[in-house]
Image (cartoon, rainbow, N blue to C red):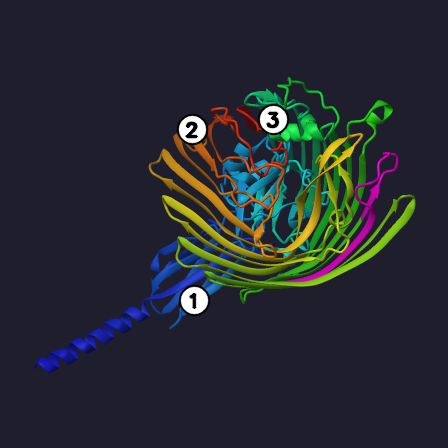
Amino acid sequence: MKKIKLVLLFLCGLANLSFGQDCNLAIRGKVIHLENNESIPGAYIWIEEIKNGAITDLDGNFQIWNLCPGTYTIKIQYLGHQDITETIELKSNSFNKTYRMEDSALDLDGVEVHGHKDAVQTTSTVSALYGEGLLEARGENLGESLKRISGVTSFSTGNSISKPVIHGLHSNRIMILNNGVRLEGQQWGAEHAPEIDPFLADEITVVKGAETVRFGPEAMGGVILVNPGELPTKKDGKTDLYLLGATNGRMGNLSITHENGSEKIQGLGYRIQGSVKRAGNIQSPDYYQSNTGLSEMNFSGTIGYTRAKLGTELYFSHFNTELGILTDSHTGNLSDLEAIIENGRPFSDGEFTYDILNPKQKVSHNLLKLKSHYHINPHWKANIQYGYQANHRREFDKRRGDLNEKASLDLELYTNTLDLFVDHTHENALSGTWGFNLIQQANSNVPGTGVTPLIPNYDMLNAGAYMMEKYSKGPFEVEIGARFDYRTVATARFVDNELEERDLSYQNFTAFLGAYYQISPSLTFSTNLGSAWRPPNVNELFSQGLHHGAAAVEIGDPDLDSEKSLKWVNTLEFSGNQTSFELTGYANRIADYIYLNPTGEVYVSLRGTFNVYEYLQADAFLYGFDFSGSHQFTNRLSAYVKGSIIRAKNLDTESYFPFIPSDRMDWGVAYKIGQEGNSHKFTVSNQLVARQKREPDFDLAPAPAGYALVNFNYLKQFPIGENKMNVGLQISNLFNTSYKEYMNRFRYFTDDIGRNITLKLNYQF
């Protein structure tokens, strides 16, 4: 009898097990735009037979579990897109598919959609500044704004010149795209800030992986995409007005953006945007920094036309700025230089003024873009983009007499870019891009400066061909890509009245492999292994003189080799109802890393005494991790934390490289009163930065001490009729702490900025 019972129990167990297996199937999927392969968050999925469904997450993924074998009808809906209805036959395996939704023209009133999509689709780590975060960053330059993203810091020359740093790399190793066009200025200079107005952006995205395959050389450290919003395609006028004022530097900033569509021509839209900015001398806690004012005036305009198969866009932007360079960074003789470095601050307290005197910079940048696309069929789209840029940089030194108004460095750079590529998407979950791009560049020294040019005239031509393919199946994505580049550089200049010419050529093959997996509805993992390269820039090869804006003598090496790197980035991301976090770890091995090293020598001339730097090359290994997280304690109270740690080792000498960010962490608590769209939000934060203990063998002064800053932020949002008003109050360095940032090249001469109170008004109508 016992044996019979055991057999019956065993058979029942098998039946239950079989039943559990049969009804443990799943329908997984990903919903993206047919137009551009970008994910669609918030799409609604409904299974009619079980009267249940799901909503896609920020990456467009969805999962429906515990389904038995059978026939199911799946319906996918998203505002402004054509519905998708499909019959699915579930057998013994779960179902995976990528769905591509097509836009549909709908006239809807009184509906406001709040959402976000990444500006670029990649398996590499992507972070973005948008919405409320971008609102709080308004009025700051690009480098300062992006410090809100973990793993991104800035390399600055004083307070007004700032360059983004991603995982320890900056300048020519970071590519910046202005509305899809690679920004080409004199970005090789450490004190050459990006010529871009952050007010034109609706979203600023940072890609932290090696993106040479996707974007070409100079993207080995990462990519920053400054993207305006989509153009309207029907008559629906919107205007954004920003008015900002700050106490430190007595800064005033005005920006206005207006966009609308045509009532008569469906698909036609335009946007115009402009901003002006003025600030005087910056104040450290105990004194003014002489000649640190700035003046800026910018403009951009876009017109576009979009139909079912054809789209075209014309874009123009103008950037113009005048920047003062700290007077105390230019000293008269060796003893003065040694004295101010030892003193650590200017000998006089200075005074406030809006006047900008020599030394200073005047920079203008014009960018013109024409882009079109054509849908060959439902699966293939052809794209063409042409970009033209004209950059004019003038740097003024302290001089006597009539020469005082003549630039010591006068450079004109003209760049033409052409991108031809096709995108394809298919129902079998494959998508990809094949393309070719061409960059032609000419740089000239404008004669009449009376000074030997820092860099020679040159012509550069770069041609690259690439392919990328992505396979998407439910929660899983895998992506591969490869690229080949060939570059020629022809240089010429006079040295001691003799013409020196040199022709150089470089070529390289790069590739990457990446994957993304949604482990659960709340947990995702991405990994990306990519090779990258960067040919040496002309300044690294041929600099032989005083770089006025940097207040330093720089010496190049014409025999430098191309940098070649292999970077591996891994990110684990969790997004729950109350808690979210992101952890990114990376390792970057760079062969023949080029760096600017202080020699310990000084150069004495009639124009002053300056430190001497030289470009050297060594194998490097950079590694570290970024982290960020937040927790919602109640409907009103929340907290966040973010930070980064990076190590950069010189493998040739077993020492450390200069100008690598030190360990840092930022944490804060926020309290919010009211409902969305009509609320008060108070935030108190604490920024902690450690002393950089991993210094190079020689530096002009020891790394400064670590510091802690307390900041306060208040944001009030409320409606005015059908319009919207945002009022912000920010207090940076609340306790007026004296500190020096290791990544500031002027830390030898002055403290950083003191307390700064900023009032921001934003009216949307």
Residue 15 % position (x, y): 24, 74
Residue 745 % position (x, y): 63, 36
Residue receiving disc 2? 682
Q: Earlier in the sequence, mark 3 or mark 1?
A: 1
Residue 466 falls inside the magenta stretch: yes
Instruction: Tell which tag, 3 or 1, sits nearer the viewer.
Output: 3
Q: Is residue 188 visible?
A: no
Residue type pointed to by label 1: Phe
Which residue, as the protein is rendered here, is positioned at the far front? Answer: 335
Residue 749 falls inside the magenta stretch: no
Return the residue nearer the eye: 214 or 471.
214
The part of the chain drawn in magenta is: 442-468
Is residue 140 shown left or right of residue 388?
A: left
Residue 53 % position (x, y): 38, 55
**In the figure, residue 604 lies in which quadrant?**
top right
Residue type pointed to by label 2: Phe
Vertical arrangement, residue 572 with respect to residue 711, above or below: below
Instruction: Tell which tag, 1 or 2, sits nearer the viewer.
Output: 2
Q: Secondary structure at mark 3?
A: loop
Q: Secondary structure at mark 2?
A: strand
